[in-house]
Image (tube, rainbow, N blue to C red):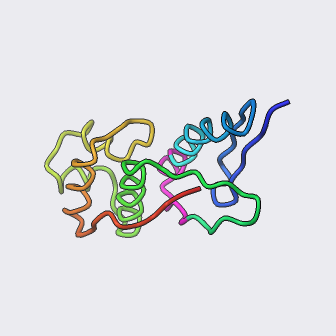
Amino acid sequence: PGLAVFCRDLPEFNSYGHNEADALREAMDGIQTALSIYVDQRRAIPQASPAELGEHIVHLPVATVATIELWNTMIERGMRKADLRRLLGVAQNTSDRLIDFLHASKIEALEQALGVLGRRLDGQYYF
């Protein structure tokens, strides 16, 4: 009984629910945990593939999308957390939270960090 959930684009992700609605709700936590693995391993987060027949899409909160954009920009430029902290002129815990998928950062803070890097929030991520 129940439903297992997987994602082609995030092989680190798996989740479970008692039914389809429950599984999709639980998927959000699993996705954010999988995204944290990418940060821990200093890897870029992949862009989502278009859904195939029979697949469901989980739309991510805007703050999660902003965090993905920030993280991928940092990886693209070879930046570390300390580089972001110096660039923003903030305390370590503040900059660490900006790229922590298990911590809800304010969208304004994420937009400011993206702006300092010359980026703006316009990507679309869903899994």
Q: Quadrant of the C terminus?
A: bottom right
Q: In this rendering, is residue 124 above or below 19? A: below
Residue ID at (22%, 47%): 109
User: Which residue is farthest left?
Assistant: 89
The image shows residue 71 at horizontal and vertical percentages of 39, 57
Residue 42 located within the stretch drawn in magenta: yes
Q: Which residue is depicted at the point 20% across and 55% down?
A: 112
Considering the image in quadrants, where does the N terminus appear?
A: top right
Q: Is residue 84 above or below residue 103?
A: below
Task: Tell me residue 14's x, y (percent).
Answer: 69, 43
Does residue 80 appear to the left or right of 117 in the view shown?
right
Q: Residue at image x 41%, y 55%?
A: 65
> Is residue 10 inside the magenta stretch?
no
Residue 102, percent across and down? 44, 36
Front residue (pair 76, 64) = 64
Q: Is residue 77 left or right of residue 49?
A: left
Q: Where are the magenta residues, as a range?
A: 36-47
Q: Position of residue 20 (x, y in %)?
A: 72, 39
Residue 113 left/right relative to 45: left
Considering every residue shown, the one lying at the far front of the view is: 21
Count of numbered labels shown in the rendering? 0
119 vs 36, left or right, is left
Farthest residue, direction right:
1
Camera-side residue: 104 or 20?
20
**Quarter assignment of residue 121:** bottom left
**Residue sitting nearer the eye, 96 or 107:** 107
- Residue found at x 57% / y 64%: 48
